[in-house]
Image (cartoon, rainbow, N blue to C red):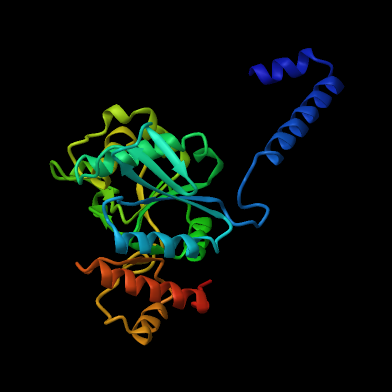
């Protein structure tokens, strides 16, 4: 005879039923008070950490200023830019929305180091958000579309430009020295993945570029986490390289008519051109770009 029935026989039947009913009520109260970001219909909160170079000069500063103003239109997004500053007297200095990190700019290990440092600096703020996006200064993100997609398709480690994703379901077939990773143009994290990175930063390979090294960490240390693309049913997962459109506003309008583009990556080898086209893209988006359901 099971323990359940033994207890039922020992206890007074009425008391048993009252106790059981009380337990059900308590469980209902607990679950009804669990905080969710979706139930109240409000947009889910997103922390946007933007990789920025203090050595970039003119066009990079323009990119920072124009994206700063554009991202302000999304009330559910908090954006910080982060970069190295070699003459900093302390480890960090947050001035408005720019986090300066003591150090010198470099490709490897610089980008990865300042990214992990930025994660660590904001570690007490990260749990307040549903997602953290690590983007870069020359990528424009339509957070209105991204938020809608993340609301429907939750991710822990998300990508738009996704490398080696064909091995997601069969990691045993992954060729040696091959990494499944999200391009650094836009890496989407749940807070628990970010906190795992912070707490185990000593396990991250500083000899690789940042996005590949982070992907390798997730692959090896969090094998249960599968990289997931946004806009799963589209060809490029909402990602688009913006070509040289001769700074032509009408051509850019035609590009933006594709309402499945969330990430506009600007990298034509000419940063002045990129900055000029970014200005037009943001101008068109602010005029009222199409949305999707």
Relative depth, front residue between 157 and 62: 62
- Residue 12 in view (yes/no): yes
Q: Nearer the viewer, residue 98 or 15?
A: 98
Which residue reaches farthest left?
176
Residue 65, percent from left and from top: 42, 61
Q: Is residue 103 toward the left or the right of residue 38 in the image?
A: left
Q: Residue at point 30% right, 38% down?
A: 87
Looking at the image, residue 220 lies above or below residue 291: above
Which image quarter: residue 254? bottom left
Residue 29 lies in quadrant: top right
Q: Residue at x 80, y 21 (%)?
A: 16
Toward the viewer: 88 or 192?
88
In the rendered image, the vertical position of residue 184 relative to residue 253, given as above or below: above
Q: Quadrant of the N terminus?
A: top right
Residue 88, position as x, y percentages in the image: 34, 36
Residue 52 position, x and y percent, is 33, 52
Q: Give the residue furthest to the right.
A: 14
At x 74% / y 32%, what residue is drawn? 24
Which quadrant would residue 86 be assigned to in this image? top left
- Where does residue 76 sit, x and y in percent of width and height? 57, 55
Does 264 sit left or right of 164 as displayed?
right
**Residue extending furthest toward the top:** 10
Residue 224: tell me if it is visible.
Answer: no
């Amino acid at each position: 005879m099971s323990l359940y029935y033994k207890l039922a026989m020992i206890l007074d039947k009425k008391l048993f039923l009252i106790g059981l009913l009380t337990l059900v009520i308590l469980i209902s109260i607990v679950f009804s008070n669990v905080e969710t970001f979706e139930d109240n219909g409000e947009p889910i909160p997103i922390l946007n950490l933007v990789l920025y170079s203090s050595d970039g000069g003119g066009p990079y500063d323009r990119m920072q200023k124009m994206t700063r103003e554009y991202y302000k239109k999304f009330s559910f997004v908090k954006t910080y830019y982060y970069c190295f500053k070699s003459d900093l007297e302390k480890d960090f200095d947050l001035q408005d929305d720019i986090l300066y990190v003591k150090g010198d700019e470099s490709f490897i290990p610089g980008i990865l180091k300042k990214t992990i440092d930025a994660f660590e600096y904001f570690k007490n703020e990260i749990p307040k958000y549903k997602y953290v996006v690590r983007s870069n200064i020359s990528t424009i993100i339509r957070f209105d579309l991204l938020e809608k997609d993340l609301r429907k398709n939750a991710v822990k480690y998300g990508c738009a430009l996704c490398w080696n994703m064909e091995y997601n379901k069969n990691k045993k077939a992954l060729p040696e020295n091959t990494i499944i990773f999200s391009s650094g143009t836009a890496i989407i994290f749940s807070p628990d993945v970010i906190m795992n990175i912070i707490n185990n930063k000593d396990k991250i390979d500083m000899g690789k570029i940042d996005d590949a090294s982070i992907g390798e960490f997730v692959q090896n240390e969090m094998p249960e986490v599968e990289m997931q693309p946004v806009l799963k049913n589209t060809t490029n997962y909402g990602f688009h390289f913006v070509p040289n459109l001769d700074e032509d506003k009408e051509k850019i309008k035609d590009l933006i008519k594709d309402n499945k583009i969330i990430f506009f990556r600007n990298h034509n080898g000419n940063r002045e051109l990129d900055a000029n086209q970014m200005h037009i893209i943001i101008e068109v988006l602010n005029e009222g770009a199409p949305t999707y359901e």
